[in-house]
Image (tube, rainbow, N blue to C red):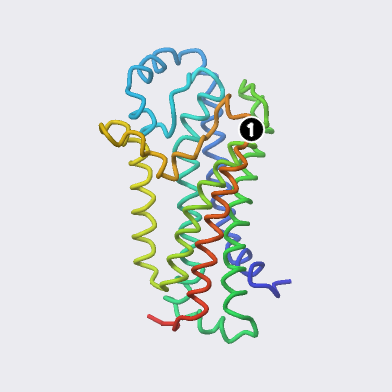
Amino acid sequence: MLNKIWTKAIYDQKLSLIFWNLILIGISLLIMSMYPSIKLSGDALDKAINSMPKEMVELFYGGEAQSITTPIGWLSMELYGLILPFALIIYGVTNGINAIAGEEKNGTLELLLTLPISRVRLASEKFFSLVLGLLIIIISFSTFIIIFKDLFDLEFEYILIVIAGIELFSLALVLSSIGFALGTSTGNKSISVGLTYTITIFSYLWNGLVGLVSGIENLNNISVFYYYSGLKYSSNRIDLVEFFCILLFSLLIVSLSIFIFNRRDIRTY
């Protein structure tokens, strides 16, 4: 059953995947259950949020202001703005770096390389298991929200949750790919973790604060968070060009890192 690297990698992650699914479904349930109360008494919060500069709202809530008395506004602010994106980024980056650099640091990579498989196949299947793990988590909590939204008076078209899930996948994929690429090409777990999270935090802050700086306010499109739309009533379709550009970039840096991995010396720590 576990005759492929990617199936073994997913099997080894089973407890981690169960944990992430239960945690995110639990958080989703908690936030959904709060909506009926917010719907009745959220006007004051709307006024407070609308009084803030647009850039500050994007920084603290992960996107532009929407009325939290609406189902989409509430879920966007409290769930799809910060919690879900950063949870998926943490999962993806951690597993992406551990895929090769973690094995190398633990001294188990050399054992894997004694198997009758190429380095290219090993790294490719490790990356595939990372992508599959992200999809499993996103599909799980998205399905939960769609099935149980009506219990909490959350009325909206289910396609908005599907599109938001694709947006989440795109964001998590590109940052996870950066972590995987750094870990695979350098073999240094510590440096890869530091660089990847530095890129993530800088990108997030740049997207939220650059609009406050005169002269560079139009440069927020260099941040990966600029392309994350989250959950909005207006987001009823996917920008296919943007999605495939993100996918192509992710595959490009991963392919480059596998090319380097296939030729470098393997070190143990």
Nearest the eye: 138 or 179:
179
Left or right of 255 on screen, residue 178: left
Does 118 sit above or below residue 24? below
For the N terminus, which image quadrant?
bottom right
Does 224 sit above or below residue 150? below
Nearest the eye: 172 or 237:
237
Expressed as whole percent of the image width and height from the top left, the position of residue 132 reads: 63, 57
**Dot 1 amino acid type:** Arg
Report the residue marked by disc 1. Answer: 237
Expressed as whole percent of the image width and height from the top left, the position of residue 92 reads: 50, 55
Does 58 sit above or below residue 227? above
In the structure shown, which secondary structural element does the residue marked by tag 1 occupy? Answer: loop
Expressed as whole percent of the image width and height from the top left, the position of residue 249 reads: 52, 55
Left or right of 30 on screen, residue 149: right
Left or right of 82 on screen, residue 146: right
Nearest the eye: 18 or 245:
245
Residue at screen point 37% across, 80% down: 269
For this orientation, the residue located farthest to the left is 214
Picture quarter containing residue 236?
Answer: top right
For this orientation, the residue located farthest to the right is 1
Residue at screen point 47% across, 31% down: 78
Determine crowd level at label 1: few under 14, some 14-19, many 20+ residues with C-alpha closer than 10 A: few
For this orientation, the residue located farthest to the front is 215
How many badges with numbers are in the image?
1
Nearest the eye: 52 or 145:
52
Expressed as whole percent of the image width and height from the top left, the position of residue 178 reads: 46, 59
Residue at screen point 55% across, 36% down: 28
Residue at screen point 37% across, 28% down: 57
Does 183 sit above or below residue 64? below
